[in-house]
Amino acid sequence: MGLQLGTFCVGLAALFAFAQLTAKPQSRQILAAIFFGSLALFIAYLLFFSERLLQNFPILFMSYVPATVLGAVSLFLYFSLYLEGRELEPSDGIHGIPIAISLAIYIAFLGISPSQKVSWIHDLYNGKGIEFFLPFTLFSSLVSAIYLIKIMRLNPDYYSFDIKRRPGLTGGIILATIVLGSLLAVATVSVSFAIVVTHICLTIVSVVFLLGTAIHLRDPSVLSTWIADFRKTYQKRNYLNEINVSDVHSRLLGLMNHDRLFTDNELTLNKLADRLSISRYQLSQLLNVEMKTSFSRFIQTYRIQTAQDYLDTYPNRTILSIAYEVGFNSNSSFQSAFKHLVGMTPSEYRSRRKSPDALPPSKTL
């Protein structure tokens, strides 16, 4: 039963990962694909380890290290981008450090011959040499626990013990249970006990995943409602009570309209917050709550409106030069943003500029 359930969950998680990449993937879709891919790999490892079948799939040996780290980091970044209404930034590169370490561990073992790995796996099942692998397991468990805590800290109100936040509390208990199970497996040198704990973790992960999938298929709005509720409680946290909102808003518009800061193609939420001498969380909430927009949309709107002016004023300038002028890093990102906000490509806009009635109004903040 466990083998069939685990196999089904591996296939389902892999299918979800692939589905995230079928359309033009944005940052959050890519992160979701990484999470589901990591979940599939993690379940596969739990399955083959607990069923004592790992020696038949030596390529999976030590794969739980990058699977747990990648899953936890990608999930944290997913919620971080969603709550703050932004895209991935260079400053997010720091989260690549634990990922790089976990991948280096796996790649190092990947270079070892399959026969040697099979020999190690047999030794592990016989209770030999487990202490050699404990540091790697501790590393992956610790990183995962830290990032799961960071997810809860993104919105601690949602994981409070207030009965009104019961969904959040339930999610917290599930995550804590999985982490606790991993730590229990690490804390023992008994392989038989580790296999029992792995069975428990596999059951918990599989049942929760299948239950969530069933709920989503029955009513797709449940997931979006839960995420929206998570964001709603996040936005209720008053990050703006220590700043003069009116003054910051005025300075923000000055940086855009006078200093034309939006033309900086390396502009990030952090950099803009530093220019305003406020935190990224205060800026994010100012944009999301007070101005009803996101950082990405706010900056792109300025860039596209300026690009429209250039297309009208300078008919002989190339579209690519205009894209770089207003702050885009590539023609593809400019084309995508322009079509999203204006409803047509820059070339179509330029060709129709002599017919104002044919031009739809651009979307505003």
Image (cartoon, rainbow, N blue to C red):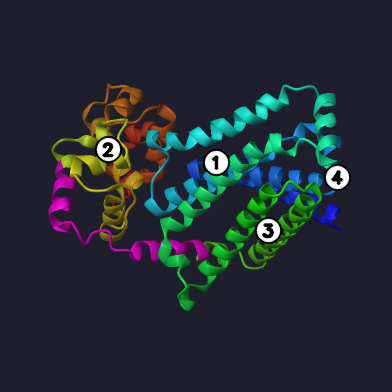
Pair 2/4: label in front: 4
Name the residue at 42% across, 55% down: 154
Q: In the rendered image, is residue 67 in sight?
A: yes
Q: Quadrant of the N terminus?
A: bottom right
Pair 4/1: label in front: 4
* Amino acid beneath label 4: Arg
Image-quadrant location for residue 69: top right
> Which mark is on residue 30?
1
Pair 3/4: label in front: 4
Name the residue at 14% across, 43% down: 254
The earlier-in-sequence mark between 3 and 4 is: 4
Q: Which residue is mark 3?
A: 209
Q: Are marks 2 and 4 in contact (CB under 8 Å)?
A: no
Image-quadrant location for residue 100: top right
Q: Which residue is mark 4?
A: 52
Pair 2/1: label in front: 2
Secondary structure beneath label 2 = helix
- Residues under labels 3 and 4: Cα distance? 23 Å
The earlier-in-sequence mark between 2 and 3 is: 3
Image-quadrant location for residue 5: bottom right
Please name whichever residue, 122 or 67, is drawn nearer the observer in this view of the structure: 122
The earlier-in-sequence mark between 2 and 1 is: 1
